[in-house]
Image: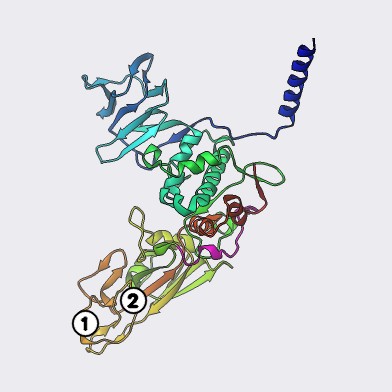
Amino acid sequence: MLQIVYRFLCLCMALFILVLSPATPCQANEISVELVWKLGQASWVEIDVEQGDYQLIVETTIHKFPTGSTLQLGWGGWTPILRINQEDYQVSQGSVLELRGNNLGCLRVKTPEGNDVVYRGGLQLNWENGHWRLINRVDSEDYLKGVVPIEMSNEWAHGGIEALKAQAVAARTFLVRHTENGQKTITDSPDIDQAYAGKFVEGEASAAVDATRGQILVDTQSKQPIEALYSSHSGGYTEDAKNVWGTTDIHNVSHPDPYSEGVGGAVANWRFIVSAPLLGSTFGVGPVRNVELDKFPSGRVKSVRMEDGFGHSQTVTGRTFVKAFYPFGQPIRTAAFLGSLFEAQTIAPQLDLYGKSGLSVFLSTEAPLVSGTSSAQKEQGPLLTKVLSSSLGTSATSQPFGVFIFEGQGWGHGVGMSQWGAYHMAQIGYTYKEILSFYYNNTLIQ
């Protein structure tokens, strides 16, 4: 009898603790990630089972698909076709196929364009408008292991593991907020949601995901997940969310960020050069003679007003101006336009010492700009009179209209956590909780 009473009391205590325990809104679960970054608009794909036992579901037919199996998908005219394990191609009568794993496994996805990525979990493939739409169904914590190292770096685990933990919590918070508020699918694109590169990039950063498993940032009052925004480098001053997206957010406000100063290499300080004619033609005016910058308190440019030599002017937002020269799909380097925290400098045309109308300043990303000429300078490289822009190089002929130099700091929108700033904080001893507290206001970890 005593034993029965004891068990009953234990059961009551367990139920009591369960009722009083705080809610856990982000336990690991299967999510859907649309693969648009590397595999968007794919007409032909090959999928190999690298590990695990899968089922290939084609309409009502189920095929066993163990390790080593191959599926090739393409199109004939406007009709989708498929090939299973090197058999003959067949027309797909349906528009949806699915690879569902019986055991934990991974799939390698390749395209004729050279994309080659490995994903955990399963895949759903939808034929839409002449291409395959790929959706990776994956455990949410495994998804984060493909996010954290591509948003930061596995190398940061050495001396910067706390930054990786902060990134894991921020990325998990972003995921929860964007999948539990009615949005069923998130993309793998850094331009739309957050970067996700699958199993390919997994490494030492996975330890940060495991160490923070289930943890997200919530509002101190409502206890709801916040909009955990972040960018590569704040340039020394974070930005207010309202100044970027027009919506006030008490969790993402502008403030000085000394931890982002002096770190980041090319993204910390950059310089972009563009000729007056190219600058003008980009925005529908003649060769630009004058540039005026209107700025937010952070120093980021709110708008750019350009005036040409004919009295015409054009005003665009800072973000529009940056997008016109941003190096999409190109390696990041110091001679690039990386953000809206910048200053503008005009170098007007003048008569150089050789009697030619033009600029006597040489293009150099390593040394400061200098004026005047010498025989040594004449041999160094193209005069700025021939420069089109830092990204397009030089023209064969000189132009007499001058050039503009834009020198800036930081990479990205600057809202929320600065990834380089977080890394620096970790290096000097701050914990991931302290890092998150510095970058996000009115929050707590749940």
Q: Callout 2 environment at 10 Å: few (<14), some (14 to 19), or many (20+)?
A: few
Q: Which is more toward the observer, 145 or 73?
A: 145
Give SS at disc 1.
helix
- What's the residue at 57%, 59% (across, down)? 243
**Amino acid under label 1?**
Lys
* Sequence order check, earlier mark of 2 and 1: 2
The image quadrant where one finds the N terminus is: top right
Taking the magenta stretch, the answer to whether it contains residue 253 is yes
Taking the magenta stretch, the answer to whether it contains residue 184 is no
User: With respect to residue 279, does 172 lie above or below?
Assistant: above
**Amino acid under label 2?**
Ala
Furthest residue toward top: 1
The Cα–Cα distance between marks 2 and 1, rounded to whole angstroms, is 16 Å
The image shows a total of numbered marks equal to 2
Give SS at disc 2.
loop
What is the quadrant of residue 246 in the picture? bottom right
What is the quadrant of residue 102 in the picture? top left
Instruction: Tell me which segment is drawn in magenta.
Output: 247-263
Residue on which disc 2 sits: 367
Residue on which disc 1 sits: 378
